[in-house]
Image (cartoon, coloured by chain):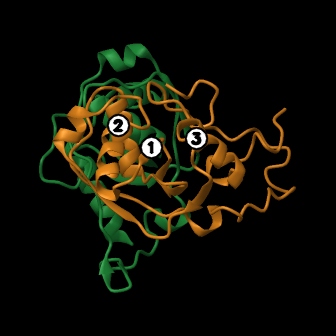
Amino acid sequence: MSTKVDRISQNHKPKSRALAIVRKYFPKVEEVADGDKAINVEVTKADSNSAAVRNKEGCAMAVACKRKTKADGVLVARSVAYIIKGKTATRYDVPQSVQKEIVSFDREAGFAPGNYQLVPTSPANRFGEYRGYSPKTRMGKAPRFSHHTTGIRTALGSDVEVE
Amino acid sequence: MKEQTDRALIIVKRYFPQVEKVEDGEAPLNIEVTAHDSDSAAVRSHASCAMAVASKRKTKADGVIISLTVAYIIKGKKAIRYRVPNSVQREIVSFDREAGFAPGDYTLKTFPQSLRLGSHKPKGPHKVAGRKIKFHYTTGIRTDLNSSETDAA
């Protein structure tokens, strides 16, 4: 049976957990915050060609984001992205349009050049907004069906994540 | 709105001219896609992609149309419409770019009440604070069902 912590979704992770994840890649980071404005990112053909598949720091979107934001580093997971500047990591949501390209890219079918966005996390999912599950939620019902996309980068926070 | 149903019917009739009625599915449809489905299917084809082949087998349908966001299961003169969830959309993009459709269990979902055929839909462009919302269009995949181009059924 899963514990309460296990059932917390990626976006509901407490700030300390997000910080621990980011620090695996960028140990000097000391603070994690939510982004307030969407970032427009242009992914070029060169980004797609120069980047590494199944790599959160070196994929086409990460390369393009790093160039656009002049960041020290970028982490692009399937549903969340962190832009690292100095000791601060800023968190954004990865929209569905980018998620589709990530799946294609990680399976070596390319990241289509074009204009994409990283969007701020929705108000309900921002750091400090987690209020727990209602005890009435889905009591006694079968677990909700979910499909996990395979053949792509590992999930941030999984045991096998750091390449 | 009747107009909405008519439009769906026109789209389906391009592929399956015998269809006379389009309805929304009432319950989600669980589909198992096998490695064999993925190998035997045709990329960028609405009617014979891996998900279409698997859906056809599961539902014993006369035909299936799978677009990026909407699926139609054809049985006789009736087409039943389902919503294609994000997990399937990602696989469709991968499949159409010749990177395979991962075998596994997927679901075709029902439309929420507000998006069902016959429900009211506001007209005009969506605007946020006077600005148009930016859309990204995924390329290198099957054509849009609304477009004038169609692949062979």
**Residue A52 as seen in the image, left or right of residue B83:** left
Name the amino acid type tagged 2: Cys
Circle 3 — which element?
Answer: loop
Tell me, what hue is chain B? Answer: green
Q: Residues within 10 Å of mark 3 (few under 14, many from 20)?
A: few
Tell me, what hue is chain A? Answer: orange
Asked which quadrant contains residue B88, the reply is top left
Q: Which residue is mark 2?
A: A59
Q: Determine if residue B112 is in view.
A: yes
List x then y, in percent, for residue A8: 72, 47
Name the amino acid type tagged 3: Pro
Spatial CA distance of label 1 from label 3 is 17 Å
List x then y, in percent, for residue A45: 17, 41
What's the mark number on residue A76?
A: 1
Q: Determine if residue B84 is in view.
A: no
Asked which quadrant contains residue A161, the reply is top right
List x then y, in percent, for residue B126: 35, 77
List x then y, in percent, for residue A40: 32, 62
Return the chain for callout 1.
A
Residue in the image at 66% along x and 43% along y: A20
Same subunit, labels 2 and 1: the answer reads: yes
Disc 2 and disc 1 in contact, CB within 8 angstroms? yes
Spatial CA distance of label 3 from label 2 is 20 Å
Circle 1 — which element?
Answer: strand
Q: Which residue is mark 3?
A: A27
Q: Quadrant of the N terminus of chain A?
A: top right
